[in-house]
Amino acid sequence: MDPLASANALLAGRRNEEAAQAFARLAIQAPGHPLVLLGLATAQHRLGKKEAALANLAKVRPRAASDAVIAHNVAKFHLAELDKRDEGLAMLREAHAKWPDDVPLRDDFIGVLSGLDAAGETVDLGRAALAKGPDSVNLRLALAAGLLQRGDAPGSTEILRGALASWPTHVKVLESIARASVYDPRADGAAVRLAHEAHANAIRRHVPANAPLPAPSPGARVLGVLSPDFKRHSVSHFSLPLITELAGRGWRVHCYYTTESQDDVTARFKALPVRFLDCPWMPPVELASRIRADGVGVLLDLAGLSAGHRLPALLLRPAPVQVNYLGYAATSGAAEIGARLVDALTDPEGSDTHGSERLVRLPGCFIAYGPPPHAPEPGPASPGPFTFGSFNALLKLCDPTVDYWSEVLKAVPHARLLLKTGALSDPATRDYTRQRFEARGVDGARLDLRGWADDTRHHLSLYDEVDLALDPLTYHGTTTTCEALLMGVPTLTVPGGRHASRVGASLMHAAGMPEWIAESPGAGVRVAVRAAAGGRRDLAARAAVRHAFLASPLANPASVADPIDRALRDLGAQAGLAQG
């Protein structure tokens, strides 16, 4: 490997001190080399030497006007290191316009768009680029992400399966297919399992079979919790109170945090009586070694295939008991993860073949919600007609869901539908979403489409405009259902055939409101009609729903911590861990 490639490999591995030294040596050997200076600037910035980093960046920027590679890398520095999204995106856009045939630049530009709630432009540019050629795996990944972001899981999967012809073992392609399968209405439990097992098998080929891990000395009451979401994230509403409860039940808890983002919720995790390790860039063998050295007997993975997952480390079996739970609505596909915590409503008898893990069915609901601090009280209904609503991610808006919700709106012709999610910040995605309903005979003016609301109180207060929340069919809401209940709004849910499409039934049953569980979309339409005939939900009705929710097991973390405590102890005992 040439010296520049070696230095870049150190940078990619976040070995920033070594990378800075390597680039500094190269800068002496090749003074003024733009890629060397950019690499040095990146290492310096990560090490907190921001003034030196910006000085080196300034030396390179003039060259970006005439060199596509430099323009591309300067833009990436602004995006990834300086966190200047708008400026970096503008640079990429300008560079792509100047050098439209530069494939890495094209792919990176479309890839950045796919992560910025810009699904409309991502799909338009991605399709045009794919038609023009040349094909590339990164182009397909970006286009597939854009399609999925606006609710087209089948289209996303089609693009990804096209990539397998040329890149049959590409890990990111197989991971994206597995993730898309959870949202795809065509995929039954068996198909979801196969997609996830194919991804796990692809990763396993890159995991060293005889990694030099420390000798195991697991403690029966030592619990590891692995997650990318110890921050403001939907998962933390469930994981923070659970970890608090388990730490109070005699577990020595180690939290392994796999992303860089730090916020006030991260601080709350760090304030718990746990050991907390920030490990966002730790290589798999090193992370597995750390978990093994910490004596973890039971490792709870809260990621699945979510962004920031560490499945390669889990394949090394750092703990004798490894459990999939909470953060992902499907199997991991990995036999190395032996159990998955669910309940009898999310995963009834007969669904055991939907995953690679053994299902451990908890009594009652498998999760419990912890409301955010300072959540507002429900307010009176805003003026206007009866309003259905969903604040779920647009990824869940599959065609059968649009069919169902369109029938609801046609059966209640005076009502409107409020959809709120980050993807709807994009005007093109709003237009596309409106057109999907119009194609089914619904006046687009009846849809109120809103984007992201960063402030939690403002986000929750928007439920004052909603009288009845609607659950998507293929992939139910979880946090959104609990938030709606907290704000006095029930969710009408229709159970499907696999875990992701059955969570809503478990939640509404645990909340003591089974009347909002419909056996089919047709039955759901009838329930919606009856609800709308009763008129808008007044303040007293909202307060009653909130009170019932807060008094239910669904809002009582101790109700789920006790059975999880027992389940984890039992799994440890079955693995031969001595119980203290």
Image (cartoon, rainbow, N blue to C red):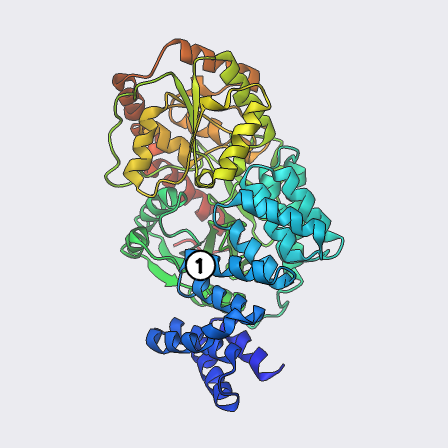
Q: Position of residue 248 (x, y in %)?
A: 30, 49
Q: Quadrant of the C terminus?
A: bottom left
Amino acid at pointer 1? Thr
User: In the shown orientation, is residue 536 left or right of residue 118?
Assistant: left
Q: Position of residue 64 (x, y in %)?
A: 51, 71
Q: How many marks?
A: 1
Residue at 57% across, 28% down:
436
- In the image, residue 451 sits, relative to residue 36, either above or below, namely above
Left or right of 23 in this view: 242: left
Horizontal side, residue 232 vs residue 529: left or right: left
Q: Which residue is mark 1?
A: 258
Residue 440 drawn above or below residue 104: above
- Pick whichever, 18 or 95, lies toward us: 95
Quarter of the figure with residue 136: bottom right
> Would you call the spot at circle 1 few (<14 residues within 10 Å), some (14-19), or many (20 or more)?
many
Q: Residue at x 39, y 72 (%)?
A: 45
Residue 402: percent from the left, percent from the top? Answer: 56, 26
Say whether residue 579 is visible. yes
In x, y percent, where is residue 278? 39, 63
